[in-house]
Image (tube, rainbow, N blue to C red):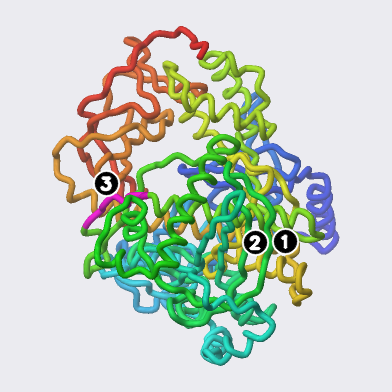
Amino acid sequence: MLNADALSQLRQLKSDIKDNKVVFPGTVKATNGRFGFVALDEGRDVFLPPEEMQKVLPGDRVNVTEQEVEKGKTQGVVDELLETRLNTFVGRYLVKGKGHFVVPETPGINRWIFIPPKERMNAQQDDYLYCQIHKHPIKDGKGQAKVLRVIGKAGEPGIERSFTLATFDLADTWPDAVRTQADSLSESDIESREAGREDRTDRPYVTIDSPGTQDMDDALLAEPNATGWTLSIAIADPTAVIETDSPAEQEAFNRATAIYFPGEPLPMLPDSISTRLCSLMPDVKRLALVCDLQVNNDGSLGDYSFHQAVIQSKGKLSYELVSNLIEGREDDEIKALPDDVANSLDQLHQAATALRKWRSEHALLSGDRPEFRLRLDENKRIRLIEPSVQNEAHRLVEECMVAANRCAADFLANQTAGLFIQHPGLRDDRADNIRALIDSHAPHLSGVDAHQAEGFRKLMKETDALEAEVPVKAILSRQLARAELSFKPAPHQGMGLDAYTTFTSPLRKFSDFYVHRLIKSALWDTPMKALTEDQLEALQAAQIRARQAANSLEAWLKSDFAKTLGEEPMSGVISRTVPAGFFVRLDANGLEGFVSCKDLDGKYSFDPVTLRLIHNKNGRIFQLEQPVTVSFAGVDEERRQINFKLVEAQEIPTGTGSDDG
C-alpha cells in the first residue's frame, strides 16, 4: 500500500504528464459510419476512431490529443469535454431483450441510447419520441436518454408533421404572452391607427392569389401616364399593430418565416393577425405600406415613394380569373368586374410585361421549373400530386413584387441601416472546376469574370442558349452559392441585380417585417430595435431550419406515396449526379428518386467538372437533363429516399471535342 508521500508523488507525476500533453480544441463532426472527426479550431481535421466517437456526440466541443497509429498516420483521443451542444433529439423506441433504447433519427448519432426505467414515460415499441441526453457518454461511451414526450405512433394521421416539428424544434402552439397580445387586438385597433395615413379606400386595389389563401400580403393597381405607368403596390402593415420588441414580434423573429407544410401551414404570426386584422381582405379597411413607382415604357424603373395608407381592396381575384382576363376570355365573373378594376388589371399586365422584358435584357430571370401541388387525404398522406401551372397572372404578380422590392433595396442602400439579400453567384470552392468547364465547353467565355455582376449575367445568359455536348447552364446552376442576409447592400447575382431586399411578405417572413420597420423608421421616425450581428445569424439559421423542415416532411410524404407507383415505366430527367449514382425527377409528378451505380452494368467514374458519370470501359454517359425511363424500386426508409431502377436512357454521344459556342 502506498504511503502518503508516494501518493503525493504519483499525483504530481500525473499532473506533470497532463501539463505536458499537447491538446487541441475543436468540434466533433459525425459521419454516416461509426467513426468521426474533430474539426480543430486551427483549421484541420483529426480522425476519431469508433471507440473514441462513442464517447462524444455531434457538435460537442472537446480537447483532443493526437497519437500515432502507424507511420505518418495519427488519430485523435478525446481528452476533455468542454461543452455539449446536443440537448434534445428525436428517435424511435426500441425494446431489445430487457434493454429499452431510443434509436436516434438525428444525423450523426449512429448508436442506440439506453433509457433508464424511470425515464421512459410509458413509451411503447416503435413509438416516436422526443428525448433529452440524460447522461453524456464521455466517461465510458455509454450515454443515457430520458423521454420528454411521446410524439406518436407510426401510421397515425399527421405523425409525419408532428415528428418533423419535433425534429427541427418548431413550435406548433403560441406562447401565452403571444396569444394574449393577439387576442387583445381588434378592428378598433385598425381604426385607431388610421389617423395621419393617406386615405386610398376609393382606389381600385385588388389582391391576386390562390383561392384558398387567407394571409393576403399585397394588393395592386396601375394607371397609365405619359411615359409608362404608375404602379402602386400596397403591402399589409403588421408593424402598425405589433409593438416593437413585443411577444408577438419576438415569436415572429424566432420562427423567422411561415412554413407552408403540405396540408397545414405553420404560420409566423397568429391567425387573428395574419389572416384577419392585417390581411388585405376585400371590402374592409386595412392598413398598408404602399410603394408607388414609375414604370417607364421600356420597363426601367423611375421615381418611387413610400406611403402609410388605408386601403380597401375591391376584390380577391384568383390567378385563373386574371389570366383568363389577360388572354381575352369572357365569363360571368370577368364581366362582373367593375370597370376601374378591369382597366387597372389591363394596365398591370402591360406594366408587368415591360418590367419582365427589361429584366430579361438587363438582369436575370429564374427558369420556369415545373412545380407540383401535394393533395392530402383524411389521413394527412398524399392522395394526389398535380402540376401547379404558372400562368400570366403569376408572372404579373411576380414582376410587381420584384419591382417594389428593388425600390425598397434602393431606398435602404441610401440609409444608415438596412437589410438586404445578397447572392455571391458561383461557389468559390468550385472555381477550378467551373474554369475547366468553361475552357472546355464554352471557351469564348473563358475571359469572363463571373465574380463581377456583369460577368455573371453574361455567363448565365450565354450558356442558357449554348449548344454544347454537356448542359453547361445546368452544371453551373448546381454550383451556385446560397443567398444570404446582410446589413450592407451587395449584388444579388442570381437575379442579376446590384442590390435586392424583400418587404412584400411581412405576414410570412420576419426579414420583410423588419424591412417595414427600417423604412418607417427612416421616413417617419417610428421606433424600432435594430438587429445585431448575432440576431442576423440566428434569423438566417431559422430560415434554413424552416426550409429543411419543409423538405424533410415532403420527402417523408413523397416516399410513402411512391409505394403506390407500381412497376410501370415512368419518364423523367436526370436532376442531380453524385459519385454513387444519379437522381431522376419524374415528368408527371416531380417525384425524385435515386438510381445507384451498383444497379447499372459495369463501373462508372464521376467527373467533377461536367458532373457526368462515365462508364470505365464503354464510355456510356449519364449527365444532367438527360431524358431517362425508370421504374419504382423501393424506398430507403432510413433516408426516406425513393429508389428507381433504370429502364432505358437517351444515349449521350461519347465525343470529347470542345465547343466554341
Number of the label disc, if any, that sits on residue 589: 3
The residue tagged 1 is: 534
48 versus 117 height, above or below: above
User: What is the CA distance from the residue labelled 3 to the residue labelled 1?
Assistant: 41 Å
x, y (%) of residue 234? Answer: 56, 67
In the rendered structure, which segment of residues is drawn in magenta? Answer: 384-391
Q: Nearer the viewer, residue 168 or 135?
A: 168
User: What is the CA distance from the residue labelled 2 to the residue labelled 1?
Assistant: 6 Å
Task: Decide whether the magenta segment is chiefly helix, strand or loop.
Answer: strand
The residue tagged 2 is: 538
Earlier-in-chain disc, 3 versus 1: 1
Amino acid identity at mark 1: Asp
| Residue visible at 58% across and 27% down in the picture | 459
> Circle 3: is it few (<14), some (14-19), or many (20+) Cα within 10 Å?
some
525 versus 455 height, above or below: below
Between circles 3 and 1, the one closer to the viewer is 3
Judged from the image, the secondary structure of the residue bearing numbered disc 2 is: helix
Magenta residue check for 286: no
Q: Does 305 sit left or right of 141 as displayed?
A: right
Judged from the image, the secondary structure of the residue bearing numbered disc 3 is: loop
User: What is the CA distance from the residue labelled 2 to the residue labelled 3?
Assistant: 35 Å
Number of the label disc, if any, that sits on residue 65: none
> Circle 2: is it few (<14), some (14-19), or many (20+) Cα within 10 Å?
some
* Residue 385 visible in the snapshot: yes
Amino acid identity at mark 2: Ala
Tell me the quarter of the picture where residue 361 sits: top right
